[in-house]
Structure formats: structure tokens, C-alpha cells
Amino acid sequence: MADLEKGTGDWRNQTSITEFILLGFRNLHELQIPLFLLFLVIYIMTMAGNILIIALVVADQHLHTPMYLFLGNLSCLETCYSSTILPRTLAGLLTGDRTISFIECITQLYFFGSMVSVECCLLSAMSYDRYLAICKPLYYAALMNNSVCFRLAAGSWVSGFVACTITTCWISQIIYCGPNEIDHFFCDYTPLVKLSCSDTHLMALVIFLFTSILTLPPFLLTLASYVCIIATIHRIPSTAGRQKAFSTCSSHLIVVTIFYGTLIIVYLLPDTDTLRDLYKVFSLFYTVLTPLVNPLIYSLRNREVKEALRKAASEAMNFITNSNLFCM
Ligand SMILES: *[C@@H]1O[C@H](CO)[C@@H](O)[C@H](O)[C@H]1NC(C)=O
């Protein structure tokens, strides 16, 4: 507990706060080391899985189609996304130092917020791609070529970062005068705005509107795409045909459900003390778990990814046996 008190002492003397304290999982104090190991394993697996997917998509010519280019972009996003949160959490668990400077906190908020928005846009671009492939197969080649794909991917990245620049600039302007304890394991909007001593009613409203504008249209687009996809698949007469059509979008549907499901639960949950721990647990789902399960789901369920993986593995084996021969 000593580290908790160390930081709290000095804010009272200051007019504005220069550092925050991330309380994290404070009731799990004995579990610091097991938690550290758990998160370390999760982080290593997330990085390895996503980097593997990026390497496969970039290296394998068969995967140079819009669906897999989007998947490569999503993996790229998720390596960055978990790197904005997990290394910081890991360092905190290991050293017990929970302080985070104001600048670090705002930076984390900025990158986290931007990447959540980019993820919403990319997921909806991916479901639009599946919608065209399944519901409008005759027009697919005309409507979804590489240049459209490039524009959708680039648009997702740019809009996510631009929109978050605006909200983050604003949040960094409000005055914090203490207390400086953030009851969360990373700097998120809601806990941070709650700490301000400016009048945040207007700000909370505007941020709510802003996040709705950012996340609602991609969410509705994704939902609409899947309603059309499922309706179309439902009309396919043969079971085999139905399964084949569904198999191309089932991985994506699982990822979308986990991501939006937990995001909606977290932001719609009423903010009470008893639900605070539940809030943290669900935050873990979309910050830590989605980046981890995404490559797993795709590599386990998707035939073409599995094929590319097998080919890459056999090439690697060949390379190793050949280089062994050279050594002998
Ligand atoms: C992301 O999408 C763009 C546009 O289609 C593509 O050129 C690029 O290779 C993709 N990136 C990855 C890592 O797959």
C-alpha cells in the first residue's frame, strides 16, 4: 500500500495535477505476480499471433484480396492497440509504481481512443466487404476492387485519429485539481473526466455525442450488413451452400460480437461502486481479449489462412533442413 500513499500526498499543495495514480486491480494485491505473468503471456501471444497474420497477408499472393488486406490492417491495428495498454500495465504490476504522468495519461487516452475508433471503422468496412461478396456477388469485383479497399482502409485510419485529436485536445484542457486517483487500469475517458473540477456536465454530454457519432454509424452499418447477409444465406436452398457462404464470414461475426458486445456493456453500465469491478473486467475483454482472440479465430476457422500457414511452415522447414545440410 505504501506506493499508493506516496503519490497521494503531494497533490494538495498544487493548483493543477501533474500526475495521476492508476489504482488498477487494487483488491487483488496478493495476485500481482500471477497477474503479471498472465498478462505477459497474453501480450506475447497477441503480438506473435497478429504479427504472424500480417506476415502471411503480406507474403502470400493468394491473400492479396480485400478481405485479407482488411484482416492484415486489423492485425496491424491490434498490435498497436494492445501495445498502448499492456506494457504500461505490466510495468505497473511488476514495479508496484502506479503513478502515470499527465502527459503519459493523455497520450495513452489519445492512442487508445483513436484505435478503438479505427477498429470500429475497419470492422464495418470488413462487414461491408462480406455483404458485397455474399449479397451482391455479381457486382463484387466492380464494387470492391483494390482501390476501393485502399480508400476504405485509409479512411478508417485517418478518421479515427483525426476525430480523437479533437476530443483529446479538449480533455487535456480541462482543469484537474485532485483527487488524482483513477479507479481503472488505464486512462479511459469516463474515469478521467470524472476527476475534473471544471464543470463537466456539458463535456460529458458532448463526449457522449461524439463517441456516439464515431461508433454508432459503423456499428449500424455492421449490423445492417449482417442482417442482409443472414437473410441471403437463409434463402440458399442447399445446406452445403449455406455452410460454404457462412464460413467466409463466421470468423468476422465472432470478432464483431465480442468487440461490440463488451463495448456496449461497458458504456451502458450504470456507474455505481458495486459495478466498478465489473466495468474493469469487461474493459479487459475489449482491450486485452479481442486483440488476442482475433488471430486465433481467423487462423483456426479460416481455410485460406490455414492453407497459407501450412505453406509457410513447410517452407520454413525446408529452409531449416537445407541450411543444416550446408553446415554439415
Ligand atoms: C492494409 O490495407 C491496404 C489497402 O488495401 C493494403 O495495401 C495494405 O497492404 C494493408 N496492410 C496490411 C498490413 O495488410
Image (cartoon, rainbow, N blue to C red):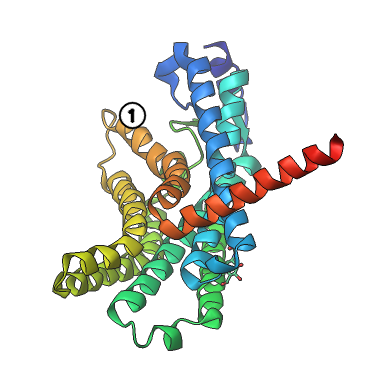
Location of mark 1 (residue): 277
What residue is rendered at 44% in x and 85% in y?
141
Above or below, comparing residue 131 to residue 283 in the picture: below
The x, y position of residue 130, in whole percent, is 36, 71
- The kind of residue tagged 1 is Asp
Evaluate whether residue 5 shows in this view: yes
What residue is rendered at 53% in x and 66% in y?
63
Looking at the rendering, the quadrant in which ligand 1 lies is bottom right
The x, y position of residue 182, in whole percent, is 47, 33
Q: Quadrant of the C terminus?
A: top right
Q: Nearer the viewer, residue 8 or 70?
A: 70
Above or below, comparing residue 307 to residue 41 in the picture: below
Few, some or many residues within 10 Å of mark 1 (<14, 14–19, 20+): some
The x, y position of residue 302, in whole percent, is 41, 56
Give left or right: position of 84 versus 127. Answer: right
What residue is rendered at 44% in x and 33% in y?
184
Tell me the element at label 1.
Answer: helix
What residue is rendered at 53% in x and 50% in y?
310
Evaluate whether residue 177 shows in this view: no
Residue that extends furthest to the right in the rendered view of this protein: 327
Give left or right: position of 227 versus 130. Answer: left
Q: Nearer the viewer, residue 179 or 93?
A: 93
Above or below, comparing residue 141 to residue 205 in the picture: below
Quadrant assignment, res 89: top right
The x, y position of residue 62, in whole percent, is 54, 68
Q: How many marks?
A: 1
